[in-house]
Amino acid sequence: MKTKMLLPFLSAISMMAADPAGFVIWSVADLKGVETKLAAKIDGQKFASQHLEKFGNHYTMLAYRQGNGSAELHETEADLFVVESGTARLLVGGKIVNPKTTAPHEIRGTSIQGGEEKPLMVGDIVHIPANVPHQLLLTSKEFSYFVLKVQGQ
């Protein structure tokens, strides 16, 4: 009799113990650890990134910069990012100068003509729809940001 009464209780505890599929928490310490690793492997473009997880139609990454980004446009992905450290100006809109397709549905260029400047600082959250030119111009030595890329836009 006691065993029958304990089974539902034990089942409930075991179901609460497991995280749901796709559930993730990235702590501040986790993100700082990735940022430190990225700083050590910075490339000639003064940029490094690391994918964190992929979930269906979206994926996450941490990006780290020590210099300005190129102008870019994602034809089928929206960007949502959260500034983790540093400051920058975001050029958004306008037209990409010297556009080149660098990967399927990805266009890069040297700059943006006619865009609007938006200041960015720690804690800011940015959403950039697909097909919108954008470029990060650093106003600090380093700039890191958590990115959520949403595909199929």
Image (cartoon, grey):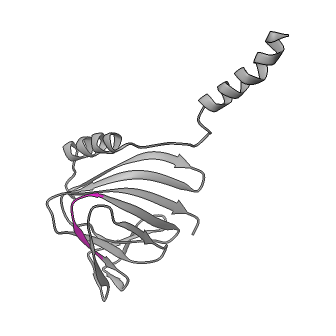
Q: Which residues are magenta?
A: 84-90
* 111, 11: nearer the viewer: 11
Q: Is residue 147 left or right of residue 76?
A: left
Q: Residue at x 41, y 43 (%)?
A: 26
Q: Residue at x 62, y 39 (%)?
A: 20
Position of 92 relative to 49 (above/below): below
Q: How many marks?
A: 0
Q: Is residue 151 left or right of residue 143?
A: right
Which of the 4 image quadrants contains residue 80?
A: bottom left
* 21, 109: nearer the viewer: 21
Which of the 4 image quadrants contains residue 8?
A: top right
Residue 16 position, x and y percent, is: 63, 32
Residue 53 position, x and y percent, is: 48, 45
Of the 4 image quadrants, the one containing the C terminus is bottom right
What is the chief secondary structure element of the magenta stretch?
A: strand
Q: Residue at x 40, y 57 (%)?
A: 147
* 116, 119: nearer the viewer: 119
Of the 4 image quadrants, the one containing the N terminus is top right
Inspect the magenta stretch and tell me whether residue 85 lies in it.
yes
Residue 42 position, x and y percent, is: 21, 49
Position of 65 relative to 3 (above/below): below
Q: Residue at x 49, y 67 (%)?
A: 78
Inspect the magenta stretch and tell me whether residue 134 lies in it.
no
Residue 4 position, x and y percent, is: 83, 15
